[in-house]
Each structure stands twice: as C-alpha cells, then as structure tokens.
Image (cartoon, rainbow, N blue to C red):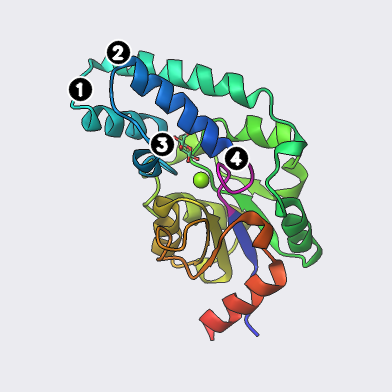
C-alpha cells in the first residue's frame, strides 16, 4: 500500500475558524466603502491573499481607489483582523483537528502549514500547535498565491518530500485547485459541490481521520 509521507494544512477554516474573522473584517471594510458583500461573494476570497482580496471586493463594487488608499484600507482590515485573533486560544481548534494531527504524528508522517495568511504564525502560536507542525511556509515569500501550486510545492520542498507522496487539506476552492495543480492528493473540508475537484471531501473537520485518508490515498495512487 502506497503510504502518505506528508500532510500539508491550510489554516483559516481548516485548523481554526479564522475564515469567519476574515469574513467579518472584509464585511466591515465593504460596508464602510458602500460595497455589497455577502457570504456567497466571500467564498471567492477564501484562500486568496490580502491585496488580491481587496482588488476583488473593489471590482465587485465597481470602485476605484489610489494605491495609497488601497494600502490604507488593507491595513485597516488587517488591524481589525489582528484584534480578533488576539483572543484565540487552544479552545478554538476546530473539532477533531487535534486528534487528526496527533494520529498523523504517531504514524510518523510529516506535517506543514501552507497558509496564505501573513498572520499564520500568530494564530498557530495562540492555538499552541507549533510543535505539531514540522514546517511552516512563510506566505510573504510566495509570489503566486492559490490557486497556483507554489505554496504547496514549497511546503513539500521544506519537508524534503515529493508531491506524489503528499496530501493537502483545504476548505477553499482556490486551495483545492492549488493542491491539484501541485499534483497532490486533495482533501476538501466543507461543501461537496464547491470542492468537487478534491479527491476526498468531508463535511467538517470532525470527520478527518488519518486511517481513512491513508486508505483513500492508497486507492488513488494504485
Ligand atoms: C487565507 C484566507 O488563509 O489568508 C484569506 O483564506 C486571507 O481569507 C489570506 O485573505 C491572507 O490573510 P492575511 O492574514 O495575510 O491577510
Ligand atoms: Mg482556508
């Protein structure tokens, strides 16, 4: 049976519910700029970097801002987001995630964080899970964000692994596309329809199970 050697995690919406905090912070910004913003539109922003997200929101509202004003708005959104993540504690780890990560460690499989967020380090420190991650990709060093494969390729490289031996876990469509573009096994967390390109979709994190993942991975690679 083909064994998994590395599991690469997205953070926001997979390990903890910071996707909701990003939503709240973007919603506030959109309201301030009089741009319509709902959860359906927010789906398009999941996994997408800060400035790219702002551009999508401005496009959606048909609004033009100077480069300086864009910088100011993005900083304001980030300050709002940072206030929310300051309050994060280990109790905010999504159901089943800690068990899943511990099972992975016990199996001797490596883990990495492949988050587009420049706040990822602060979040994992507050969640107290740094010891469960062998490597963390620095989002600031990524030139082509999700859905490009770069961040997942970099994560595998940092672990010294090749793509075909890795699986990625994502809640965003752009993230699943990035994992597939990196030629890895993709686990989607959330809506089956939205994440249809994933190799295995679970409704929520409580259904993440290492043995089941290993089995599905082996089937896909046979
Ligand atoms: C991703 C989120 O993980 O990080 C996006 O899914 C977010 O919603 C992106 O825009 C960038 O995050 P940050 O913290 O660098 O603004
Ligand atoms: Mg996510």
Q: Residue at x 77, y 62 (%)?
A: 103
Of label 2 and label 1, which has the lower sequence position? 1
Image-quadrant location for residue 4: bottom right
Are dots 1 and 4 in contact, CB under 8 Å? no
Magenta residue check for 138: no
Residue at 54 percent across and 86 percent down: it is 222
190 and 186: which is toward the camera: 190
**Label 3 CB sits under 8 Å from any ligand 1 atom:** yes
* Earlier-in-chain disc, 4 versus 2: 4
Left-right relation of 108 to 172: right
Question: In the structure shown, which secondary structural element does the residue marked by tag 3 occupy?
Answer: loop
State the image quarter where residue 29 is shown.
Answer: top left
**Residue 58: image x %, image y %?**
26, 27
The residue tagged 3 is 49
Question: Is residue 95 in view?
Answer: yes
Tag nearer the camera, 4 or 2? 4
Q: Earlier in the sequence, mark 2 or mark 3?
A: 3
Residue bounds of the magenta highlight: 9-16
Q: Residues within 10 Å of mark 3 (few under 14, many from 20)?
A: some
Whichever of callouts 1 and 4 sits on the residue coming sooner in the sequence is 4
In this figure, which residue is indicated by the disc labeled 2?
Answer: 69
Q: x and y percent of residue 68 in the render?
A: 29, 13
Q: Give the CA distance from mark 2 to mark 1.
A: 12 Å
């Amino acid at each position: 049976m083909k064994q998994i050697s590395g599991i690469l995690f997205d953070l926001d919406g997979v390990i903890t519910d910071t996707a909701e905090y990003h939503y709240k912070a973007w919603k506030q910004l959109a309201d301030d700029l009089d741009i319509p913003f709902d959860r359906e539109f927010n789906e398009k922003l999941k996994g997408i970097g800060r400035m790219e997200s702002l551009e999508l929101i401005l496009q959606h509202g048909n609004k033009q801002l100077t480069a300086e004003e864009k910088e100011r708005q993005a900083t304001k959104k980030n300050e709002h987001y940072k206030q929310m993540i300051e309050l994060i504690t280990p109790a905010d780890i999504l159901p089943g995630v800690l068990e899943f990560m511990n099972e992975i460690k016990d199996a001797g499989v490596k883990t990495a964080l492949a988050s587009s967020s420049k706040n990822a380090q602060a979040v994992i420190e507050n969640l107290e899970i740094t010891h469960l991650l062998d490597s963390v990709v620095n989002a600031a060093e990524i030139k082509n964000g999700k859905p490009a494969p770069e961040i997942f390729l970099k994560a595998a490289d940092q672990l010294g692994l090749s793509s075909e031996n890795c699986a990625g876990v994502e809640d965003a469509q752009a993230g699943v596309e990035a994992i597939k573009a990196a030629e890895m096994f993709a686990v989607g967390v959330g809506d089956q329809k939205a994440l249809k390109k994933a190799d295995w979709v679970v409704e929520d994190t409580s259904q993440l199970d290492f043995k089941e993942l290993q089995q599905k991975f082996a089937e896909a690679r046979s």
